[in-house]
Amino acid sequence: MQILDGRLLPISQLALIVRSPLTRSGPRPFSSDVYVSQNLTRAHVLMPTFDDLAASRRAWINDVLAPWCRQADRKQLIKAQIDWLNLAGQVDPKATLWVWAWSRFAPLVHDGLPGLSETNEVKVTLNSGSIISGYPDNRESEHGQLVLLIQAADGRLVHGDPISIDDVQSVEFARPEDVVAPCPIPDRPLTMMTDLNDPEVRI
């Protein structure tokens, strides 16, 4: 996808802009050119290659979609999750959409982890001024709501109430001097969502 004059153009709808062969001016969303004869009776179209389209999609995801996730509110992120297959392809939204969204608070994520980092205790400051400390629970934190494991009075770790991403003002490490980097995991493709209609899928 590309942004043209403030509009987001999906790859499935290639925008071919008619450009003069003399001035060759005007916007160029793709490498396609439309050469129009002087009498405008015919045009020769040079279509982009598949590699061009794939590169354009990757650039859109990295330069537009991921930064948008880091700024959007929870309502917009939920809408994006519903249509994530069309936006980002067959990838797990928890490992992409929500990791990108929570990455606005650096202590919650770590490069190479497909979810929230659970290694270090964090201190979450809410817009209300309240401060909550605990360990992020990646499994329980879903749909833009952060769940922390909090130490109870008897020493047990219990789940706190879900915290909306919209209510979080800042996140920092509770004990910066004790921060431990998560163990790296081997490089691997993003988790793909299984097509249950695929005859090759075995239950």
Image: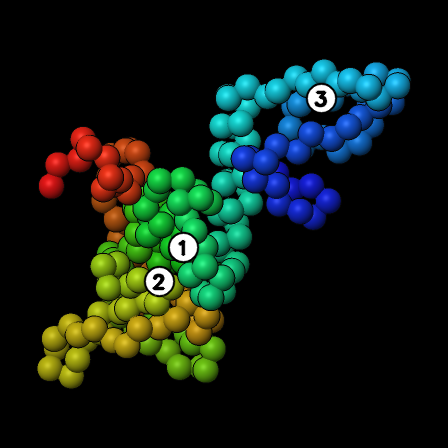
Amino acid type of the residue that numbered disc 2 sits on in the rendered structure: His
Relative depth, front residue between 48 and 70: 48
Closer to viewer: mark 2 or mark 3: 3
Secondary structure category for the residue under label 3: strand
Label of residue 81 in the image: 1
Q: Is residue 103 visible?
A: no
Q: Is residue 187 above or below residue 109?
A: above
Amino acid type of the residue that numbered disc 3 sits on in the rendered structure: Asp
Q: Is residue 111 above or below residue 81?
A: above
Label 1 packing within 10 angstroms: few (<14), some (14-19), many (20+): some
Outermost residue to the front:
41
Q: Looking at the image, which residue is at 50% across and 40% down? A: 62
Q: Of marks 2 and 3, which one's residue comes earlier in the chain?
A: 3
Relative depth, front residue between 156 and 91: 91
Q: Of marks 3 and 1, which one's residue comes earlier in the chain?
A: 3
Label 3 packing within 10 angstroms: few (<14), some (14-19), many (20+): many
**C-beta proximity under 8 Å, tags 2 and 1:** yes
Q: Dot 3 corresponds to which residue?
A: 33
Label of residue 143 in the image: 2
